[in-house]
Amino acid sequence: MKTLATILFGAVLFLPLTALATEIPGGPVYGHWYSSGNPYNINGNINVPVDSTLYIHEGVEVIFQGNYMLTVDGYLEALGTETDSIHFTASTDWNGIIFSNAPDSSHLEYCTLGAMTAFLGFIYCYYSNPVISHCSISNNTGGIAGGGITLESSSPDISYCTVSGNSGITGGGIYCGNGCAPLISHCNIIGNNAAGEGGGIGVSAGSNPVISNCTISDNWSNWGGGIVVRDGGSCTLTRCMLNHNNVYTEGGKGGGIYFTSPGGSLTVTNSTISNCFSNGDGGGIHIQSADSVSITRSTINGNYANGVEAVAGAISSIDCHNLVIDHCDVVNNGSLTGGGILLDGNTNLTLTNCIFRSQEPRDIQFSNYTSASVLYNDFYGCDSGLPFGPNPPEGLGELVQVNANGDSCDVYYNIFLDPVFVGLYNHDYNLRWRSPSIDAGDPDSPLDPDNTVCDMGRFYFNQDVMGVVELYPHVTVIPPEGGQLVYDGWVYNFTGHPGRADIWTYAFVPGVGRYGPLDLYRNFRIPPDSIGMNDIRQNVPGLAPGGDYVFASYVGVYPNTIIDSSYFYFRKSGSVGGGITGWFEGDEWLKVGDLAESNLPGAYALSQNYPNPFNAETVISYQLPADSHVKLEVYNLLGQKVATLADERQQAGYRSVTWDASEISSGLYFYKLTAGDFAETRRMMLVK
């Protein structure tokens, strides 16, 4: 009888014969759990003993009936499938999964893990290296560290996971401490928060996570909205997207990343840090007391440092002994002083091959720095008209010579010309063929892949391409009753031999979004020099809404492969249609059937509201590639919801909604779209 009891209470359960719940008391668990035994009600603390294995099969539902935990001293093989996950949840709260000195090669795959409040975080690894993949870890609360995953002296492989809506003290989503070196790849770390630091990820105590191909967005904390690295920790980011991470606390720093780690290093490569916000220094990145920071081939755009004394919308650096920034695009960042970069304290900067555009109010604020080598960069379009603050290196910004391209430059070969990006309207910072930044980088840097002198900025222009499009507008104001948009359109071929490509056009319509294609020429022959037409006429109907438009042309393979694009703005001064609904029902706007299913949006997207800033109405546009349940909400700076603009199932297509904020006070607000697996947040400014 004792042996039988051990088998039953140890939950070595093989194919239960009934659909009744399987009751698991506290104690050891091992063997197999199948979905035919669902649900597995856990009524005490359970553990997988040393040298034992618990196999949890697809479709199993594990429900903790109280504040209990699963401790893994042996092996856990929880292997769900893409279509049949394993679900860990609780009737109230539970204490998560703990790997403690467990051997390598445990697996959590296609599991959902949620609704947990635990002292150590939902998944806690101590000297253990499980493989965690394709899991959803959401809405959990950690007591001392990460709400989703807490790692100490562990180096697991975490991939293709979604870590969302978790909260903790440090590292709302993931915390790495005590010498961890996890590999984190292809994960979405979204909407987490930390009461202390590192809303998305917290790193400390000699840890060194390698993070690649991840999206880290909409996280917030008091310091380091997206990531915090401190106390000897290091971090490597490759091909990552950090966007809409926020620090709301007055004086809090590093909306995207806060790095303060003597002896550690921060490496950011081929990544984007955009639309992050702080109430102190460093809207994008704040660096303080650091030995080595390297930021290369990355985009830092649309970040903002708020507050009376806040500086550096993009990067603020205080006491960084070796700050290297190379081949980066720093665009449209803002703060009260030093919209781009702040240099302060014992900072040594090497800045090469970068493009700065449209900072507010300036590109670099030279404060109390040690040294600055600023070579082969393009500075253009500061809000103040002055790219640098006081005390720059001698001769910086003084046009005294020309570079190899024949453009005026300073003694350090910096130029001050429009870099001519492909599309500022959609944040496409690829260079156009006529950009002065092409072949203007440091000739001692490695050549570009086309074997030419390196270009400035993150993306090089491929001089071996066929099909570069250019638009030259003539008539750009359309009356309310409609009229003719007139422009010249040319396609250039630099390859020296003829080729073929598709050519098509879109209009970006206020309140609607992308519309078209308006023209579509498939497999068009392009001669070895150029082909084009002057005075091309595009009819704009009276039903089209009034407002500011973008007209764009593309060359490539329709619809997804784009070799090049060009655009210009035009305005319709009013509408005879009385609004945006129904204006496209006729065919006078169209040259091809743009309402066909093949022309539905290819991906979810949330557009910037228009106008912005606004008083007191604004239009928010978004696109749905498939029928989806849509939730569109507005939040204030405290994270409080102030409006729900949509909460319903909607058909695929281009959508828009108008927010009437006439009874809302002035200030900065955030609007969040959730549809399907997509979630994105943008900010807007209400000014009365």
Image (tube, rainbow, N blue to C red):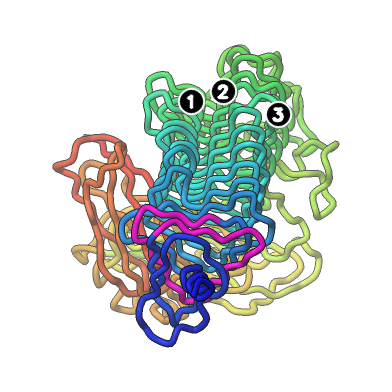
The residue pinned by badge 3 equals 292
The residue pinned by badge 2 equals 342
Label 3 – label 1 distance at C-alpha: 19 Å
Q: Is residue 579 magenta?
A: no
Residue 427: give x, y in percent of width and height: 52, 50
Q: Which circle's residue, 3 or 1, is located before the other in the chain?
A: 1
Q: Which circle's residue, 1 or 2, is located before the other in the chain?
A: 1
Residue 574: give x, y in percent of width and height: 25, 56
Identify the magenta region. Answer: 44-71
Q: Which is closer to the viewer, label 3 or label 1?
A: 3
Instruction: State the residue lying farthest toward the front.
Output: 1
Element marked by disc 2: strand
Q: Is residue 54 magenta?
A: yes
Quadrant including the C terminus: top left
Q: Is residue 466 left or right of residue 302?
A: right
At 43% from the left and 77% from the top, the residue drawn is 591
**Residue type of the residue flagged with mark 2:** Leu
Q: Answer yes or no: do the residues labelled 1 and 2 have beta carbons within 8 Å? A: yes
**Residue type of the residue flagged with mark 3:** Ser
Above or below residue 621? Residue 246 is above
The label shown at residue 281 is: 1
Label 1 – label 2 distance at C-alpha: 9 Å
Tell me, yes or no, if residue 455 can be seen here.
yes
Label 2 – label 3 distance at C-alpha: 16 Å
